[in-house]
Structure formats: structure tokens, C-alpha cells
């Protein structure tokens, strides 16, 4: 990048000697302005996925800083550029504080907030006579050293410096630990936070960097346009162009906005040259629509996948058109770039793709549909699924499961719609009496025994959590001791997930205290709670979809309790993947995993954070019996490494075998806590699950 920057500077300086037209300097200056703006926008909106319509605000603040400071206060232009950047950064800090701290705004609400900011600033500039009162400000050309060349050269060098700075920042962020953190925020922010990524700080740094670079670029832009008016900086043109450029080039890579800026500025220039200036916004809008449909990830990825094909198309069109002598150089350049972009984009559709190897030969199409939609079968669907599975899957079960499942299914059928009855009946009616010996051999640790082992790893005392008028948890007290596997059960809506959210710091209790390792976690951000030794999985897996399976796990190592560099984290990640039997899928993206594999990935990611307590929230939901067997074996293996586990689960027969203790929640309160066999035959528990009549 330094070489390209130096080359551009040298070419500009000696442009007449090497036959470069002065107009090319003007055009490149414009390209550089948009590179700086799109790149700075991309830090938050591309890398972290917080789509902003407010880039004009930072450009405007920078431009007005230049106009007011040089025009009214005799401040030198070289000082006005960093001051513009500083003020852009302060504005970004304020926007970030409101959006991320006060409101935790995301998605369209964040976009709306950022859209409002330039409008507010425009009004402020119009009514404030110390700015320009809406009249606009002419910026006189400042004095500059003679060796620089003419004024256009000076603007070129300043724009080059700001663009180079912006791209250098984006490049540094891209491959860094910080960049991975932003990508995790983009893909699954909640999951990133509970893995240890300080998401608030990361977003604030990204928005402030964007504001500083945007403001600096705006200050130079003011000199370039020579007349700053509210409409030219605070209007919708700047955000529209920045978005088109970044989406066109690609938002997940530092090179994307650079590619997009070159293409869009040359297109814009050719439209103007052809007298079609008035159509500019229509063309940009149409381009955006086309892109969203054809190549939503942008050109960078497509060009990277087919570099020689794209280069070939570019060269053929450029040379062919130049040889005809009919076309201007810039026309030929534009058409050559379009040819490369079109060929690279359409190549995937028309050229043969390597057939992706199915990661799982037993992958069911219905499960694929469920997985891809990102949804987990709901309880009612689970009932239907259980009934359907009765016919087809029972025949394939290992004997032990068939013996357990058949009575469950038989009894579940009359319980119309009660999916969990299938498992519950087995758990309560059949499994409990069978459990004794086998489980005893697996080190049953009751509450008393566990207590004897030492201090509680997790301790909740009198925890209540209200959501408006709904009391999800009501005075829950619970402890988890070393070496335990605590099964947390209860009917739907009894508060299990809420409790998990409180234990990992994602929610704060309305009353009561939660302590991890004796340390109260009240008020701690989830990423800090993660560093106290708590990790969790989600009922609906939340992998980082843009990363490979290996990098998903490496993220947890990098941001976990011990921390590590990316390369160290990747090799450790491989070990954790082996623990959950996913080592062979390390290089694929989570999108090609089935539900079971996604749950295993959740587990690998959680243990990679090296927790002392692992919270598994319905990790078996939606799995078939063979997958449940496999998941249970993995859970046992994790437990054998010394991690205490809390398993939230509806499958009582599984919990009966797996848990060393079972805690039952009903309507937000603990109604039983103790040895699995005793708890599962407790009339109060049976009543909570199956209703008063059956009990
Ligand atoms: N963010 C929220 N806002 C409002 N109410 C909530 C929220 N989260 C949970 N609740 C309510 O709190 C109660 C407990 O919900 P929770 O999800 O913890 O139960 P659960 O036992 O995990 O249920 P399930 O087994 O269906 O997952 C329910 O009444 C639920 O509607």
C-alpha cells in the first residue's frame, strides 16, 4: 500500500513528463475522496454490520470546520484538517454513546438515528450565523509551498494522504484481533459478547475512527469544491454514494471500497461527459438495486475468486477499445472494468463449481430446511416430529433407546400437542427406576456431596427477574459445585433460559445476587463475566457465519480467559474441534453444517473459552436419537476435562442418565433440587410436567 501511495504521488508530481493529462489528477482526487469516505464508513457499517446513513454528518462537520476556521478565524488549512477530524470524532463519539450505550440500537433503528444526525446538523448550520446561516461559504485557496505544484496538486496530495490513512487503518483492522471482533459483532453480536468480545468498546472505536477519517476527508473536500453549502454536505448524496461504493466493492474487506470508488467515480465522470449528469442518482440507485440482487457481497469476493478471468476480460476490452481509436481512454477503462465485474460475477452461475462434499451422509432434507432457516423446531413441531420419528427412526435406534423411546411415544400420542410428554413420560415413568446402578457408576454427585467438594462455582441467591409485568424468575437460589452436571428442567416458560441469561451476564436480576467463583457479577458486562469462567451455548445456534468453523472456535480462544494470537488460537481451536468430533469440518463455513453439527460447534466454541462452568441451553433440541447419543457422549467428554456443566433440557430420560443433580423450575421458582431419581419421581415435579390429574 505504501508503494502504491508513493507511486501515485510520484506520478502526480511528474504527470506532464509521463504524459498524464491534468484532468486525470482531478479525477483521481475525487476517487481518493470517495475511497476515504467509503473506507471510513466501512469500519462500522461494513466490518461490524451497523448500517449508517450518517456519513454526510462527518463530512459536513469536517467541511464546515475548514470553512469556518480558515474563513473566519484565520486558522491554517493544515491545522483545520486534523481539527475537522477531531470534531468528526467527537460527533461520532456522541452518536455512538446514544446508539450503543443509551439505546443499544441496531438494524433499522440505528440506521434511522444516523439518518437524522445530518438533518439536525443542517438545521443547526442554517440557523447559526456563526457558521454560515445557510448562505454557504466560499473557501479561498490557501497559500502553500511552491514545490507542491499547482493547487490541484496540493489537493491531490492532501486527498491521497487522507485516503492512504483511511485504507491503512482499514487494512490494519482487517486481519487483526480487533477486526475479528468486529466481524463477530457483524455475525452474532450477543454470542460474541458472551464469548469475551468487548462489543461496546469495539463499536465505539469503529464509529470514532470513521468519524475522524470522515471529518478529515470532509475538510479536504471543502477545499476541493471551494464552496461549502448545507445541501452539498448534509444531503443524501454522500451517504448514497458511500453505500453504493462499499456495497459494490464489498463491505467485508478493506479493498472493497477502493474497488467500488474507482468504478463509481469513473462511471459518474462518463455520465457527466455524456451529458447525463441529471441521471446520475437514477443510475446509482439502479446499480444498488442490481447489486443487492446479483452480488450482495460485492465485487471483491467475485474478483478474488476468478482473478485471471476478470483480468483477461478487462485486458481484452481495454485493448480492443483502445485499438479502435474511437473511444476515449476513460470510456475504455469504464467498459473494461464493467467487463471484468460482469464476467467475475456471472462466472459462478455459468461455470462448473466443485461439488461440495456433504459433511453428513445422514443429513435429512427436512432438517436442512430447519437448519437453513435458522429456526429450531418449536414444541408443537417437536410433538409432530416425535410422532413421525416413531415410525422411521425407532427402527434405527440402538436397543437401549428403542426400549426407552417406544413407551414414551406410545404414551405421548394421546397427549395431543404435548411434545415433551414423549420424553417426560419416559423420564418419569420408565427411566427413573432403571437409572440406579448405571448412573451410580458414573459418579453421582448429589447436592450434599458436591457441597463437600468445596466452594460453589456459581451461586444465585434470591434471584428475581421481571420483564414488565411478567415475573420470569421468582426468588431463585441455586448453586453449582465443581464436577457437577446439573440438569435444569421445567415446563415451557418456567424461566430456564432467563436463568442462563442471568448466569452469563446477558441479563441483570431485578433482585438478588449472582456470583461466579464467589465474585458477584452484578453490573458486569457479559464479556467480563465470560472472563470469570462462564461460557454458554444457545438453543438456536449462533455461529459467526462469515468465518470458518475453525475460526469460530479460534475466536473464543482469542477472546477467552487466557487470550492468544490468531495463529495460536487456530491451532488450539483444532484441538477443541477434535473434542466434539468436528475436526474434519474445520475449514467449512457454519452454513453447511446440520443442526447437530452446529450445536457441537457451539460446544466447541464455548469450551475454547476455557470456562469453569458451561451452560448448555437445550443443546439437544431438535436432534434425532443417534445425534442425541453423540451429543451426550460429547458432553460427558467435556465434563471429564473438569468443566462443571448446567444442562437445560426437556429430555428427562437423557438428563436422568447424564446429570449428577437435577433442579426443577416451575413458574420461575425452584420446586425441586437433588438426586435425579428422587427429583423425577417427586409428585410436585410430575404435577408441574404432566398436570394435576396425571399426578
Ligand atoms: N425478553 C423478554 N421479554 C419479555 N418476557 C420475557 C423475555 N424473556 C423471557 N420472558 C418471559 O419470561 C418467562 C420465562 O421465559 P424463559 O424463556 O426463561 O422460559 P424457558 O423455561 O426457558 O422456556 P422454554 O422451555 O420454552 O425455552 C416467559 O413467560 C417468557 O415469556
Image (spheres, rainbow, N blue to C red):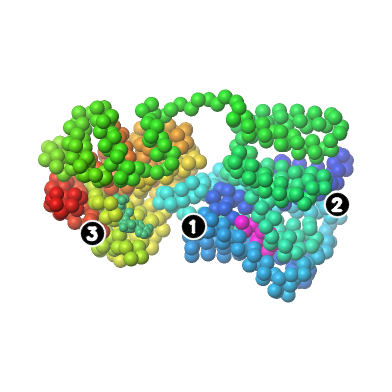
Q: Could you say whether the residue bearing mark 1 is in a helix, strand or loop?
A: helix
User: Of label 3 and label 2, which has the lower sequence position?
Assistant: 2
Residue 526 can be seen in this image: yes
Residue on which the image places disc 3: 669
Where residue 254 appears, x then y in whole percent?
62, 44
Where residue 501 appears, x then y in whole percent?
35, 55
Residue at point 60%, 63% (across, down)? 116
Q: Is residue 56 magenta?
A: yes
Where residue 621 appears, x then y in whole percent?
31, 42
Q: Nearer the viewer, mark 2 or mark 1?
A: 1
Q: Could you say whether the residue bearing mark 2 is in a helix, strand or loop?
A: loop
User: Of label 3 and label 1, which has the lower sequence position?
Assistant: 1
Residue at point 40%, 39% (across, down)? 370
Residue 254 can be seen in this image: no
Q: Is residue 202 magenta?
A: no
Q: Is residue 223 left or right of residue 377?
A: right
Q: Which residues are magenta?
A: 53-62
Where residue 263 appears, x then y in whole percent?
71, 42
Q: Which mark is residue 200?
A: 1
Amino acid at each position: 500500500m505504501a508503494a502504491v501511495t508513493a507511486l501515485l504521488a510520484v506520478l502526480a508530481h511528474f504527470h506532464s513528463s509521463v504524459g498524464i493529462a491534468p484532468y486525470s489528477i482531478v479525477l483521481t482526487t475525487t476517487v481518493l475522496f470517495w475511497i476515504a469516505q467509503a473506507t471510513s464508513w466501512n469500519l462500522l457499517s461494513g466490518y461490524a454490520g451497523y448500517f449508517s446513513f450518517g456519513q454526510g454528518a462527518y463530512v459536513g462537520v469536517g467541511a464546515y470546520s475548514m470553512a469556518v476556521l480558515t474563513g473566519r478565524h484565520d486558522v491554517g488549512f493544515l491545522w483545520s484538517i486534523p481539527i475537522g477530524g477531531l470534531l468528526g470524532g467527537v460527533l461520532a463519539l456522541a452518536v455512538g454513546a446514544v446508539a450503543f450505550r443509551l439505546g443499544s440500537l441496531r438494524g433499522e433503528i440505528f440506521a434511522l438515528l444516523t439518518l437524522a444526525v445530518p438533518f439536525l446538523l443542517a438545521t443547526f448550520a442554517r440557523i447559526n450565523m456563526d457558521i454560515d446561516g445557510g448562505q454557504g461559504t466560499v473557501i479561498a485557496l490557501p497559500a502553500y509551498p511552491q514545490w507542491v505544484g499547482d493547487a490541484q496538486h496540493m489537493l491531490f496530495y492532501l486527498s491521497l494522504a487522507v485516503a492512504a490513512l483511511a485504507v491503512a487503518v482499514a487494512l490494519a483492522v482487517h486481519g487483526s484481533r480487533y477486526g475479528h471482533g468486529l466481524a463477530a459483532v457483524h455475525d452474532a453480536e450477543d454470542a460474541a459478547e458472551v464469548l469475551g468480545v468487548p462489543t461496546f468498546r469495539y463499536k465505539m472505536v469503529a464509529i470514532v475512527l470513521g468519524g475522524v477519517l470522515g471529518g478529515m476527508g470532509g475538510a479536504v473536500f471543502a477545499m476541493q469544491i471551494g464552496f461549502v453549502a448545507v445541501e452539498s454536505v448534509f444531503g443524501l448524496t454522500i451517504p448514497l454514494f458511500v453505500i453504493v461504493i462499499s456495497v459494490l466493492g464489498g463491505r467485508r474487506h478493506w479493498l472493497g471500497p477502493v474497488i467500488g470508488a474507482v468504478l463509481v467515480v469513473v462511471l459518474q465522470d462518463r455520465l457527466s461527459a455524456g451529458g447525463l449528469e441529471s441521471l446520475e442518482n437514477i443510475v446509482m440507485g439502479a446499480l444498488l438495486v442490481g447489486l443487492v440482487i446479483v452480488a450482495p457481497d460485492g465485487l471483491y469476493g467475485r474478483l478474488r475468486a476468478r482473478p485471471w478471468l476478470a483480468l483477461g476480460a478487462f485486458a481484452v476490452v481495454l485493448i480492443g477499445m483502445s485499438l479502435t481509436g474511437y473511444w476515449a481512454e476513460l470510456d475504455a477503462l469504464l467498459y473494461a472494468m464493467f467487463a471484468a465485474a460482469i464476467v467475475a460475477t456471472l462466472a459462478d452461475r455459468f461455470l462448473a463449481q466443485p461439488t461440495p462434499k456433504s459433511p453428513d451422509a445422514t443429513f435429512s432434507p427436512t432438517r436442512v430446511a430447519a437448519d437453513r432457516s435458522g429456526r429450531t423446531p418449536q414444541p408443537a413441531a417437536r410433538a409432530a416430529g416425535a410422532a413421525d420419528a416413531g415410525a422411521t427412526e425407532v427402527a434405527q435406534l440402538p436397543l437401549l433407546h428403542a426400549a426407552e423411546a417406544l413407551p414414551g411415544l406410545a404414551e405421548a400420542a394421546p397427549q395431543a400437542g404435548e411434545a415433551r410428554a414423549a420424553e417426560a413420560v419416559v423420564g418419569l415413568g420408565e427411566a427413573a427406576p432403571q437409572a440406579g446402578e448405571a448412573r451410580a457408576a458414573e459418579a453421582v454427585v448429589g447436592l450434599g456431596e458436591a457441597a463437600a467438594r468445596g466452594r460453589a462455582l456459581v451461586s444465585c441467591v434470591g434471584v428475581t427477574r421481571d420483564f414488565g409485568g411478567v415475573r420470569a424468575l421468582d426468588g431463585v437460589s441455586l448453586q453449582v459445585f465443581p464436577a457437577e452436571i446439573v440438569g435444569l428442567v421445567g415446563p415451557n416458560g418456567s424461566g430456564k433460559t432467563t436463568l442462563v441469561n442471568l448466569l452469563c451476564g446477558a441479563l441483570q436480576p431485578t433482585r438478588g445476587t449472582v456470583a461466579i467463583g464467589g465474585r458477584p457479577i452484578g453490573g458486569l458486562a457479559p464479556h467480563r463475566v465470560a472472563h470469570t469462567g462462564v461460557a454458554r451455548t444457545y438453543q438456536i445456534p449462533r455461529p459467526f457465519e462469515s468465518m470458518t468453523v475453525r475460526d469460530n472456535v479460534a475466536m473464543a480462544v482469542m477472546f477467552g480467559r487466557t487470550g492468544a494470537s490468531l495463529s495460536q488460537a487456530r491451532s488450539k481451536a483444532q484441538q477443541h474441534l477434535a473434542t466434539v468430533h468436528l475436526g474434519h469440518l474445520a475449514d467449512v463455513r457454519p452454513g453447511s453444517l446440520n443442526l447437530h453439527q452446529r450445536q457441537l460447534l457451539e460446544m466447541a466454541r464455548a469450551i475454547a473459552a476455557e470456562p469453569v462452568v458451561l451452560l448448555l441451553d437445550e443443546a439437544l433440541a431438535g436432534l434425532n436419537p443417534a445425534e442425541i447419543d453423540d451429543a451426550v457422549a460429547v458432553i460427558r467428554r467435556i465434563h471429564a476435562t473438569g468443566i462443571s456443566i448446567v444442562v437445560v433440557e426437556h429430555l428427562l430420560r437423557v438428563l436422568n442418565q447424564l446429570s449428577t443433580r437435577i433442579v426443577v423450575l416451575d413458574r420461575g421458582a425452584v420446586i425441586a433440587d437433588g438426586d435425579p431419581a428422587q427429583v423425577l419421581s417427586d409428585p410436585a415435579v410430575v404435577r408441574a410436567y404432566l398436570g394435576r390429574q396425571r399426578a
